[in-house]
Amino acid sequence: MVDETKDLCKQEQLSIAVSYIYVNKTALMERFHSFFSAKALKKLANIPHLRHRVTTPTTGKSSTQYIPDTLTSYNLDPQMIVSQGYDWAFVMSGSYSGVQIRIKEVAHCASYIHCHAYVLNLILVDCAKNNQHAAVFFTLTALYVIASTSKGHALFYESRSFIQTNSTFDSLIETLGCLAGDNDKAKAVEAENLLHQVHSFKFAATLIIFDRILSITKSLSDQLQAKNLDF
C-alpha cells in the first residue's frame, strides 16, 4: 500500500505499508515499511549515477521505480507482490500509465485493490455535486489553496492549536480574516470573498445538513475500514 500526502510542514511524503503472511503463525500481518520525502527524491534525481533510478514521485513512472527499489533495499523481492492498494488518483490507478499497471509489469500477480472507503467518499461527492444547494462547497476549493500558502498554513495551524475552545470552522474564519488584510492584494480580495461566502446563511445551513448526513454514513465508512474485513 502506497500513499503520498503532505505532512504538517507541507512536505510531500511517500509512505509504504506492507501486508504479508507470517508463516509460523499462519496470520496476516501488516506493517508500516518506510516513508520518504518527495523533496529528497528530487535531490537524488540530480545525482548523475542515480538519475536513471530516482525521479519525483508525483508521476506513475517515478513512483513505480521507487517502490521496487525500496523493497529491494530491505531484501524483499518485488516479484513476490500479490496485491497492491492505492487511492483513486489517476497517477496511481490509471489503466495505461498508472502505478498499478506498471507494478504488474514487475509482479504479474499483483492485483490492484481500490480502497472501498474512498469509493464511498466518491459516491457522496458525486451525489452532492448534483444538488444545487450543495454546489456552494465545490466553489470553495480555493479555501484549500489559500490556506496552504505559507502564511495561511501558519495562521490556521496556530489558531487551531492554541485556541482550544474554537472549532476548525472558527479557526478558518479567523485565518481568512487575517489574510483579508494581507499586503498581497489579490490574496486579500480572494480571502475577503471567501469570508463573505462562509459567513452566509446558505453556507451555514448546508454545513449543518452535511454534518447530519456524514454522521450517518460514518458508521459505514468505519465498517469498510475495519480490521475484520481484511482477508
Image (cartoon, rainbow, N blue to C red):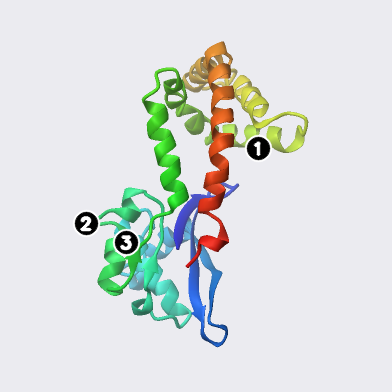
Q: Name the residue under label 1.
A: 157
Q: Which amino acid does label 3 sit on?
A: Gln
**Which mark is nearer the camera, 3 or 1?**
3
Query: Residue 96 got which mark?
Result: 2
In the rendered view, tell whether residue 196 sits above or below residue 58.
above
Q: Which amino acid does label 1 sit on?
A: Tyr
Instruction: Give the side of residue 69 with respect to residue 202, left or right.
Output: left
Look at the image and tell me whether residue 75 can be seen: yes
Instruction: Give the side of residue 92 with respect to residue 225, left or right.
Output: left
In the rendered view, tell whether residue 84 sits above or below residue 79.
above
Cα distance in 3D space between marks 3 and 1 = 35 Å
Q: Mark 3 points at which residue?
A: 100
Q: Which amino acid does label 2 sit on?
A: Tyr
**Which mark is nearer the camera, 1 or 2?**
2
Front-most of residues 82 and 162: 82
Cα distance in 3D space between marks 3 and 2 = 9 Å
Residue at 52 percent of width and 46 percent of height: 221
Q: Exactly how many numbered labels are in the figure?
A: 3
Secondary element under disc 3, as helix, strand or loop, is helix
Secondary element under disc 1, as helix, strand or loop, is helix
